[in-house]
Image (cartoon, rainbow, N blue to C red):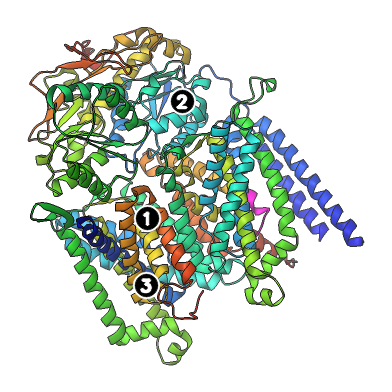
Amino acid sequence: MQKVIETLLIGLTTGSIYALMSLAIVLVWRSTRVINFAQAGQAMFATYIGFEISSRSEVFWLGLLFAVVGGALLGAGVDYFFMRVLFKHANSGPAAVVAPVIATLGLLGLIRSIVGLSWGGEFKTIKSPVSTDGYTLGSTTIPFSALNAVIIITVSIILIALAILFQRTNLGLALRASAYAPEIAKLAGIRTAQTRTIGWAIAGGVGGVAGMLVTANNFLSPYSLDLLLVFGFIAAVIGGLESMVGAVIGALVLGIGLTIILNYVGTSLVFIGGFVVLIVVLLVKPDGIMAKGKVRRA
Amino acid sequence: MELWRKARFAVRKKIAFFILLGWALLIIGDRVDELRVYQGAQIAMYTIALASIVLLTGYSGQVSLGNGAMMAVGGYSAALTLNNLQTPIWFAFLMAILVSALFGSLLGAAAARLAGPYLAGTTLALAVGLPAIANQFSFLGGEPGLLFDVGFPPESFGEEFTQYKWFFWISGVIALIALFITSNILQSRFGRTWRAIRGNSLAAELAGIHSARMKVLAFTISSALAGLAGAVLAMNISLVAPGAYSLALSFALVTGAVLAGVSSLPGVVLGGLILVAIPEIADALAGSLGSADKFNNYLPGLISSVLLILSVIYTPNGPGENLRKHLGKKHA
Amino acid sequence: MIGKTRRKRTWFVAAVLATGSLLATALPANAETGVTSSEIKLGITLPLTGAASPGYNKIGNAMNAYFKYVNDNGGVYGRKINLIQKNDEYSPQLAIAKTNELILKDKVFALVGPLGTATYTAVHKSVGIARRGVPSLFLNTGFSGFANKKSFPTSFTILPSYAMEAKIAAQFLKENFAGKKLGLVYQNDEFGIDALGAFKAAGVKFDVSIPYTSGTQSSATAQTWVSQLAAGGAQVVVFFGVTSATAALLGVAAAAKYAPQWVLGSVGSDPLILRALGVPVAVLNGALTLAGNPSPNDTTDEYVKQFQEINTKYNPGVAFDDYVLQGMNVGLMTVQALRAAGQNLTRKKLISAMETKGSTFASVAYSPLGYSKTSNVGHTGYYMAVMDATGDRKPFGGSVVLYTTDSGSGPVVKATPKRPAMPAKGLPSNS
């Protein structure tokens, strides 16, 4: 029984971090119709900035703030300088389908190389803001610590904030309109290109939070967020790529599923487990869990 | 009747071309030092792997990031066959082709309903997950992997004939044969059908093409090629290990394919050359900059990322397309 | 259509031939690869970055620092040593690629201190070290399989094997912890399995035995280890893994308030690096570890003192720890080996010098060296040390009690340590 509760709690924690990443991916997908593989790269860059600030100031939350800002700026920059150029040039031939995917892969490699060349590949650590000791109930200590709780709370706050943004504000309306029906949105006076950049900025900032949270008390290296990339992406696909709620649900499902595999099956099968979960979901619902009937695809 | 004679003539010309190419490689192999010969073997390996991407992505339009995983299937099949059954080398390579074709057909069947980002994501998950399986089952050798020993060149070749040259010969011959067969497949009605599906799946269906079946076929053949490349890689480094078939390899293959023209089969040679040349160039750059090797491992990544981005933006269909546009020739 | 294809194809063949002729290089006539009248080129592959790199990535620079010191003082018979470091990230196929570069491109004279069991196994086979006759000195790994002179004729180990280490640990466990519940965590490749076999042969039974895959160490996986160890009630936990895994295990155990008696293998136990990786000093206090060298803080030891001086001058800004000590020691032994091979330096002579004179070399480690015509094994023993509240390492029981043994079924023998004196100013003058 204890193991079940442990598994659930840890699954929730990891799932909530994946939720941030999958949200970012869905955000970009909906606004640009591009799967941004570089999302994790942007998050990694933002986390390194956060590392610099937090190790100098000894305050984790300050580092987190800078990571969010850095991530947002980078996200906006990528959209403005990179994506627009890309769409202008690569829009014909068999590669038009492939081009954006490949381009973001290239961008991921580029960010990684720059980070590696600037900071070196050695492991860095970011100290967690709260204790990482597990809570003790009676005689047993469960592997759920204050940090885990902080992660869940932080993610929940962000999700609520984003929900309010999207449902209750003009900006949110503009974002949704630009993504779903760009032509009509333009007719309604919305500056879709700018709105899209804002969407990328939000995605980048959210990614920065994910990176900082997952790295707290863990090792940071140019490759440490690769897992986040893969799992964030799988979570987004499971959720259906079209809905933010789906992204979150998909992430939680994935997080819990993977932790079950980790605890009950074996550590090496976690990755292929992710693949299996993905394939199973897609076979049953090729457009993801939240897809309702015919949904717009690429 | 005319068409028949013409077609046979074209095939004969192609065979002559490949034989000429093989002869040229033979001469080159004798003239260069061992490092270049070894790199030649790696280039041959890459050409086969890139051919698999050209077929799958360039022709049938399915973006897969998991060719590295298929290479792993091929490499491990070959190693397990060779080590446990003590068969001749060619049989091990044959097993690599068959097993990865099988896996490919399964993957293709599952993936036939997926498109675009869903397919890319699924194959990405496979690329990350499959090599890690080696750590779960001890007969797969875990992280250190399994040794793959194809043996030494025949004594009659003399003492100067190094093992790396032997690898060059074997991988070169395999690559030539594989490219020949692939070229024929791509120029046949299969190739045309795939291009039709890639262009407009709905229109193709209306024209009577069974798109799902053709997509699975594309996956199967592409995986067979990737598996063969994986076995050749295993031979070249005398090892199969999860690290040799990492996600980085899948990314590198996509990079090479796009750089050289994702729908151009002759481009795979250029792509292979580029993939082997990038670490060399990075090394030379690092040497002149004098930085510690801990930074050097990021230079190849930097160069290939920059090249990839530039080529996707400016020559998304490969340098061949721009050359054609420039020379004003119509693409038939 | 055919005409166009023909033109494309001809262009193609021409391009291939052109590239080929550009690549053609005449094979250079050479005295001995990697040796000129002014320089000796040596190569090393090690993890400068990646999961296994913490600590080990200092070894190359430490060796280099020592070589620079020797170069500034006349070199080896007037030749300067040039060490080329290549980062293999502890990955076998990357090690193969980098070693190919070292041997085929950089054309080094010999390999010194290549690191890792899986990496070197792959490299030896794939690159053909023995076939090419490349000397490979002072392998930075303890896998007992390398002690086979027939299979590895040009390779020489320096560290005692993990099998030896496990036998000694087993002896110590039997003498001091009989009746306690034992736990074992080990890296499940040749590294750990070597040790596992030796424990079994020595009759030590572990109540909890946990293998982990190299590269998967993290706080998440360490969580599962600690859960299993705690559930099994292990009171003494033996650990055979790299430093980053040690850190993960100890860190998680501290957070879970699980505090058994730790017995750490020699590989991943440097206290400075562990603390840099976030392990609290309180956890290290009282941990036992097998060691072959004196503590790097022991300035009463003539080797340590001399190496520290060289480190301050030639490796500035780098804290002197176990890894730096190890690196400099390998440097010291390499220079002695190069000198013993004579002025007319060839690969064959270097190997022969190791076989005939290697056992007399000066080295910081306490145990005797076993090099001979039939054995390529270096050091053969360890002593048990305990870490104190400052994270420093002191001999268990106050003074060094050396255990020596072999990788096979030979007995574990207690002996008094006896080392050759450190050469004057740290500069060998042997021949």
Residue A210 at x, y = what percent?
Answer: 28, 63
Q: Mark 3: which amino acid?
A: Trp
Q: Are marks 2 and 1 in contact (CB under 8 Å)?
A: no
Depth check, mark 1 against mark 3: the one in front is 1
Residue placed under numbered mark 2 in the picture: C108
Q: Residue at x 54, y 69 (%)?
A: B115
In the image, A62 versus B132, the foreground residue is B132
In the image, B77 versus A210, the foreground residue is B77
The local secondary structure at tag 2 comes to: loop
Q: Which residues are magenta?
A: B263-272
Q: Which mark is residue A226?
A: 1
Q: Residue at x 82, y 58 (%)?
A: C2
In 3D space, how far apart are the residues under numbered discs 1 and 3 (Cα atoms)?
20 Å
Residue placed under numbered mark 3 in the picture: A200
The local secondary structure at tag 3 comes to: helix
Quick one: which residue is furthest to the front in this view?
Answer: A1
| Residue A241 part of the magenta-drawn span | no
Q: Mark 1: which amino acid?
A: Asp
Tell me the quarter of the image containing the C terminus of chain C: top left
Depth check, mark 2 against mark 1: the one in front is 1
